[in-house]
Image (cartoon, rainbow, N blue to C red):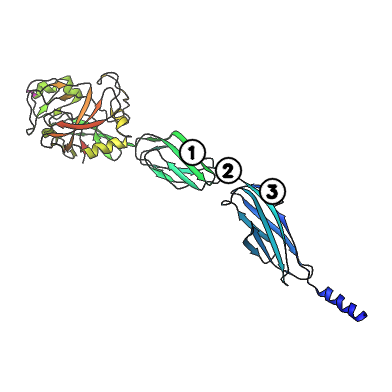
Amino acid sequence: MALLISTISCEQEKMNQPPQAKITRPSEGSEFKIGESITISAEAEDSDGEVAEVRFYINDIGISSSLSFPYTYEWNTADENEGTQTIKITAKDDDRATTFDEITIILNPGDPPVAAFTATPTTITAGQSVQFVDQSTNDPTSWSWDFGDGNTSSQQNPSHNYSSAVNYTVSLQVTNSHGSDTETKTDYITVMLNIGETGNFTDARDGKTYNWVKIGTQTWMAENLAYLPSVVGPDTGSYFDPYYYVNGYNGTSVTDAKSTTNYQTYGVLYNWKAAVNVCPEGWHLPTNTEWTELTNYLGGTSVAGGKLKETGTTHWASPNTGATNETGFSALPGGWRHHSGVFGFNGIDGLWWSATEANINNIIDAYRWGVPFDGSYIGHISESKKTGLSVRCVRD
């Protein structure tokens, strides 16, 4: 009997004891927001051997294991559902005995992002770039920028080049899995004109000196052309022969025409046949493309006219709306010789020929560009080639 008892005691002493395991972090019932990273930490020990492995489970799905201390796992909850979640660990010893511990935690809905941004610099000259910096909070995952000039970006911190001189409203929309938010800054970016060199040149044909100004990459005459090799009255006109007019003058004397105030202030009106060849050497009549380049550089048709017009009402009729002449272009309202044979719009409209013929009927029509006394806009329309208009030359 004594021998039997001794044998049973030895077998009991050799029986393997399972390891002990406990989740030490987080604690039971803890609450988190979806999107947070949760550190799961555990302790495990084996009194009669070694811990071979600790496994981590989320809602009974195995997600990781650790073979040595410290036993930890970083749980990214960005894609999880809200509500109660079960965290479980199992510990296995070197004799394959296992034990477990589990807790529950609560995931609450995460926070949508809050949009915020800055830019450097916020005042530039046309052609320069602005660096935008996202300062949104709550971990946005996507960005949608609107720079106010028709261009957009999905980069987090984009750089953008502005080519036209105007104020721009910028907005940023940020999004994460919990929602979106937008910040808009009105007239946030100020783009000023890059007015470069100015100077003058002398037309070798008649010795007259003209001012010029560089606007963007173009160099324009800063006054209406006044070359007058001959002159006729308003009742003379042609699609095919060149004619020269001075608004309000009805005669054929160049000397008398040049002595008038209209000639000295507003220059000469040319029918299209004269205009296409009238600019001095090194200069030419601008095309629609060149007029459009100027207009776009100044911020578009709705505002470019004001930036081109001479200020005040000495030469423009009141109210001369929106005139700033910030370009130095000094646009003047020379009016026209209408193709019907009458002068008009002197002091009212500045009207200039384009070298571009109209597609509809290019035999008798070409384009003109105009700025009014009562608006800041500039526009263009097809016009009879018999009409007499002012000319602004652009450098070759």
Give the Cα separation between the discs numbered 1 and 2.
Answer: 15 Å
In the rendered structure, which amino acid carries the disc numbered 2? Asp
Q: Return the x and y of residue 3 as percentages of the image width and height.
A: 90, 81
> Does residue 50 lie above or below 348 as drawn?
below
What is the number of the mark on residue 111?
2
| Of the image marks 2 and 3, the number of the one nearer the N terminus | 3
Using the rendered view, name the quadrant where residue 308 is placed.
Answer: top left
Dot 3: within a 10 Å radius of its alpha carbon, few (fewer than 14), some, or many (20 or more) residues?
Answer: few
Using the rendered view, name the quadrant where residue 208 is placed.
Answer: top left
Q: Which segment is the magenta one? A: 247-253
Magenta-drawn stretch, dominant element (helix, strand or loop): loop
- Secondary structure found at label 2: loop
In reply to whether residue 89 is colored magenta, the answer given is no
| Of the image marks 1 and 2, the number of the one nearer the N terminus | 2
Position of residue 137 in the picture relative to residue 327 (left or right): right
| Of the image marks 1 and 3, the number of the one nearer the N terminus | 3
Q: Return the x and y of residue 83 as percentages of the image width and height.
A: 63, 48
Quadrant in which the C terminus appears: top left
Q: Return the x and y of residue 310 as percentages of the image width and height.
A: 28, 25
> Does residue 168 lie above or below 59 as drawn?
above
Give whichever of 346, 314 is nearer the camera: 346
Q: Which residue is mark 1?
A: 182
Give whichever of 114, 345 is nearer the camera: 114
Q: Which residue is mark 3?
A: 30
- Secondary structure found at label 3: loop
Give whichever of 318, 382 is nearer the camera: 382
> Does residue 301 lie above or below 38 as drawn?
above
Give the Cα separation between the discs numbered 1 and 3.
Answer: 32 Å
Dot 2: within a 10 Å radius of its alpha carbon, few (fewer than 14), some, or many (20 or more) residues?
Answer: some
Give whichever of 317, 222 is nearer the camera: 317
